[in-house]
């Protein structure tokens, strides 16, 4: 009887030990799976601004506003004119450049009318006007112009008694040793100006103006 009881107690202890071992075998994989679930399954990448969708609780990636360049979280807009990748200034748009060619008869006509109208507009003395005429007009045409002005009581270069508010010169071809330009003069109110047109002939050999007449 004593031997039978001893064997029964030993068998009971074995059953308890086996149950404990089985419980550990089941619990260990479950614990490992729970630990893995708390880790990110992806490698770390660039950090993006996020915003929580309060209707779902999910995080949403916020991208810059490509219409304004504004930061999605702060709303700050980058200052125009600066290259934020290099820190250098970006050239801003400027007014159209003006240029000229001393070998171009049309450019010389433009130079003459621009300077001449400046002198007339500023009411400078006749010496400066006469100096421009001597430089840009042929000797023969200077005499012809003086005779016209005496008869018409007007400025022969402008074909008028007043001062224009603007000018424009357009090349108009060449023929028989001459180059032609059309000069448009603006008058009156700058918002609604009136226009007169002159046909200017220049000698190709000297690039001087040899005739001016109404177009």
Image (cartoon, rainbow, N blue to C red):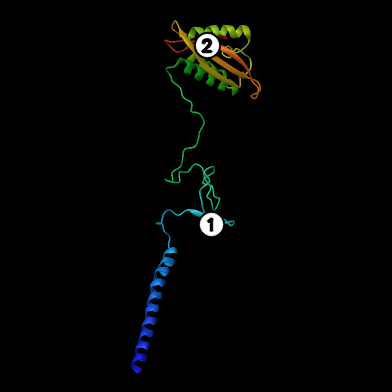
Of labels 1 and 2, earlier in sequence is: 1
> Where is 213 relative to 186, above or below?
above
Rendered residue at 60%/8% (across/down) = 150
Numbered tag placed on residue 58 in the rendering:
1
Q: Residue at x 46, y 24 (%)?
A: 99
In percent of the image, x 53 and y 57: which residue is there?
58
Residue furthest to the front in view is 1
Q: Is residue 131 visible?
A: no
Q: Is residue 197 visible?
A: yes
**Residue under label 2:** 200
In this view of the protein, which residue sits in the foreground, 19 or 192? Answer: 19
Image position of 27 (left or right of 77): left
Depth order, front residue of 209/50: 50
Q: Position of residue 31 (x, y in %)?
A: 42, 70
Left-right relation of 79 to 12: right
Return the x and y of residue 114 as percentages of the image width and height: 53, 21
Discs 1/2, front: 1
Crowd around label 2: few <14 · some 14–19 · many ≥20 (10 Å):
many
Residue in front for this viewpoint, 50 or 38? 38
Q: Please tell me whether mark 2 sits on a helix, a strand or a loop.
A: strand
């Amino acid at each position: 009887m004593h031997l039978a009881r001893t064997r029964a107690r030993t068998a009971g202890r074995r059953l308890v030990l086996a149950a404990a071992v089985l419980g550990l075998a089941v619990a260990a994989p479950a614990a490992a799976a729970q630990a893995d679930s708390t880790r990110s399954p992806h490698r770390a990448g660039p950090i993006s601004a996020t915003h929580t969708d309060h209707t779902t609780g999910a995080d949403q990636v916020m991208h810059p506003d490509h219409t304004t360049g504004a930061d999605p979280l702060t709303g700050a807009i980058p200052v125009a004119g600066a290259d934020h990748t290099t820190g250098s200034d970006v050239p801003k748009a400027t007014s159209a450049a003006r240029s000229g060619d001393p070998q171009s008869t049309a450019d010389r006509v433009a130079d003459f009318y621009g300077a001449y109208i400046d002198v007339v507009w500023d009411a400078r003395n006749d010496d400066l006007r006469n100096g421009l005429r001597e430089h840009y007009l042929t000797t023969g045409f200077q005499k012809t112009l003086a005779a016209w002005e005496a008869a018409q009581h007007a400025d022969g270069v402008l074909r008028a008694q007043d001062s224009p508010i603007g000018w424009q010169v357009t090349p108009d071809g060449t023929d028989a040793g001459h180059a032609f330009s059309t000069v448009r003069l603006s008058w009156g109110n700058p918002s609604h100006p009136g226009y007169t047109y002159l046909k200017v002939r220049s000698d190709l050999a000297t690039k001087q103006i040899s005739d001016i007449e109404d177009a």
